[in-house]
Structure formats: C-alpha cells, structure tokens
Image (cartoon, helix red, strand yellow):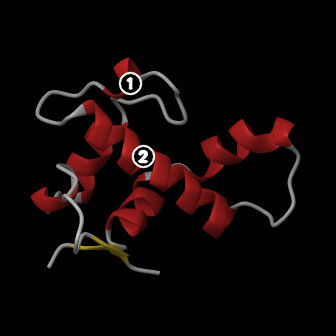
C-alpha cells in the first residue's frame, strides 16, 4: 500500500528523504501512541506532523505485524516487539514523495 501526498499538505518528516538512522533518531524522541502533542516535540518538525506520521506508523504495525485478533492487553507488548528501525523505514517508504 502506497501513501500519497498528492492533494494534501506534505508532512514535514516525509519530504526530507531521511536515512534509516536519522528516521530512527526522530522515532526515539517521541512517545508512540501518546495522545499528548507534547510527546511529539522534536526540533525541526511540527508536533502535528509527527503525531500524524507516527499515528500512521502504529496503524501500519497493527495491519502488517499484529495478529488479526489480539487482546487489547497485548497491544503494548506487540508494539514493543515490532517497533524497530526496519519496520519504521518500511512504513516511511510507503509514502510517495514525488
């Protein structure tokens, strides 16, 4: 599945063509699945863009790596298991930057 930026404002994180390492460094500074915008505060990025991007990343992990049916109590264990540089970069590359 390709995400597209056509017809919408491009998220600040998408248009930078980040390396795996740079992307993971941004990831380490946010709190995944947080409802607080302050948990998405990283210099050089807007909080709303990071919130939107990483909310999509969590949904991507659920769709691609979580079992079809899982207990809510297992959510954070599954998130911890599948949140890594490779899955983040895989999600990042679903965005069409052109």
**Place of residue 31 in the rendered image (x, y in percent of width and height, measured from the top left):** 46, 28
Number of residues whose C-alpha sits closer than 10 Å to that of mark 2, classed few (under 14), some (14–19) or many (20 or more): many
- Residue 25 appears in which quarter of the rendering? top left
Q: Secondary structure at mark 1?
A: helix
Q: Quadrant of the C terminus?
A: bottom left
Left or right of 37, for residue 55: right
Q: Residue at x 28, y 31 (%)?
A: 47
Residue 10, above or below 23: below
Left or right of 18, for residue 54: right
**Place of residue 10 in the rendered image (x, y in percent of width and height, measured from the top left):** 19, 59
The residue carrying mark 1 is: 37
Q: Name the residue nearer the viewer: 91 or 51.
A: 51
Number of residues whose C-alpha sits closer than 10 Å to that of mark 1, classed few (under 14), some (14–19) or many (20 or more): some
Query: How far, Cα to Cα, is label 2 from label 1?
Result: 11 Å
The residue carrying mark 2 is: 54
Q: Residue at x 11, y 57 (%)?
A: 16
């Amino acid at each position: 599945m390709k995400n597209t930026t056509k017809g919408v404002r491009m998220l600040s994180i998408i248009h930078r063509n980040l390396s795996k390492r740079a992307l993971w460094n941004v990831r380490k500074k946010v709190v995944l699945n947080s409802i607080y915008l302050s948990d998405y505060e990283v210099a050089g990025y807007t909080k709303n863009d990071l919130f939107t991007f990483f909310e999509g990343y969590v949904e991507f992990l659920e769709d691609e790596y979580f079992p079809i049916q899982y207990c809510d109590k297992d959510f954070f264990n599954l998130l911890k298991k599948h949140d890594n540089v490779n899955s983040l970069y895989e999600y990042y590359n679903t965005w069409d930057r052109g």
